[in-house]
Image: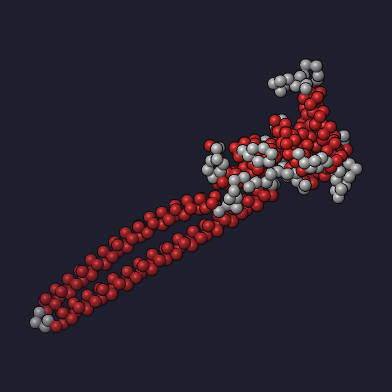
Amino acid sequence: MAEKMFQEGWDHLMGDHFQTIDRQAGQALIIRAMLNGSTVAKGFCAFRGWGSSGSDSKNPNHAEAYAIFSGVSKGFTNLNNTNNSDGLTHTSSMSQQSSKSMSVELNASVNALAMMGYFCRNGYGTEVNMGDSIRWFANAAKKKHSWAMAMLAFCYQEGDEIMRDEVKAYKLYKKSAELGYAKAMFNMGEICLVGVRGVTEAEDPDHDKAMHWFKKAALQKYAKAEERLVEYEKKQSGRLRRALRSLSRGKSRERGKSRERGRSGGSSDASRTSRTSRTSGSNKSGEGIGVSLAVAGGEIGVNLAAAEAKTKREEGGAAKATLEKKLVIIAAMMRVSLALTSPCQKVFRVDRGVVDGD
């Protein structure tokens, strides 16, 4: 029961196994687990300086924590020896309840393996040893410890005492995210914004997939994912406003040109009418001819007006088509721009998933 309580506390503290991040609740559960006899909880409280573990937050006891995690990790081998080579636990000589108890104990031991990797990486209670750190993380990752997977992914990402391998890093982050670790979900979002060479499903930047992972992490109250969603919403709103302003200016220019053409056509009609009148007045001997010319002029004016109306209709259709093309182009530019102007210009600029508060 105590070990299960520790796991629940860990999940709330870290945002693991799809749990909403609640650090206060996580801390309270871990302290209760320690008081109820959880050895791993005792080591974690010593590391963080919580409760009555013999240390306080101003002076956490890393040496004590390392000794506890080391002891639990060594004991893990003995517990794991009860497993067959296919990974199935022997249950013929034990009750179902005992089997479940051993399963919880194994899970607790996996947490200790992961913490050993973290301690060796940072030199808490021991010397910094990146090689040992990677081995501990790898052992925990094999047992499907999502946080250890994310830490191992970071090692592959950075090439820390191991050959840099972005494909392996991507796969580990993805497995960790699928197991419910919020920071790994966030990292997947960052990765999808820039793409990964060598991974068919993530070769090119994919804004939609990135938003999918950011939203999943945000559902678990992971602050950085929430900030990223707000940031992109603001960018999209800004781009939409600019696009609409651009379209509005384009329509205004089209209307201005139409009015200018209309004024030009009107002055030409007036000029033609004036010339017709002068011709009619000067030809005193041919009033019939003058009347004929006036009628002809009127017909020409009507024809010109009809032609101008037709031209405006055609121009309106062309302007609408042009407007639709502009909207398509702007939409495409916005999608590309979202990836190109992302703050994450470098592949794997991600949160490496350290223990919160460390």
The image shows residue 317 at horizontal and vertical percentages of 35, 57
Quick check: 212 above or below 338? above
Which quarter shows the N terminus? Answer: top right
Query: Which of these two is toward me, 120 or 271?
Result: 120
The image shows residue 311 at horizontal and vertical percentages of 30, 62
- Where residue 289 sits, quadrant-wise, is bottom left
At x 77%, y 41%, the residue is: 128
Query: Which of these two is toward me, 19 or 280?
Result: 19
Residue furthest top in the image: 92
Residue 25 is left or right of residue 282, and the answer is right
For the question of whether residue 177 can be seen, the reply is no
Query: Which of these two is toward me, 326 or 269?
Result: 326
The image shows residue 136 at horizontal and vertical percentages of 74, 34
The image shows residue 181 at horizontal and vertical percentages of 69, 40
Q: Check the image and tell me how it is coloured.
A: secondary structure
At x 70%, y 43%, the residue is: 353
For the question of whether residue 120 can be seen, the reply is yes
Query: Which of these two is toward me, 348 or 235?
Result: 348
Residue 278 is left or right of residue 23, and the answer is left
At x 18%, y 81%, the residue is: 278
At x 75%, y 35%, the residue is: 132
Quick check: 213 above or below 252? above
The number of callouts visible is: 0
Residue 39 is left or right of residue 175, and the answer is right
- Where residue 94 sits, quadrant-wise, is top right
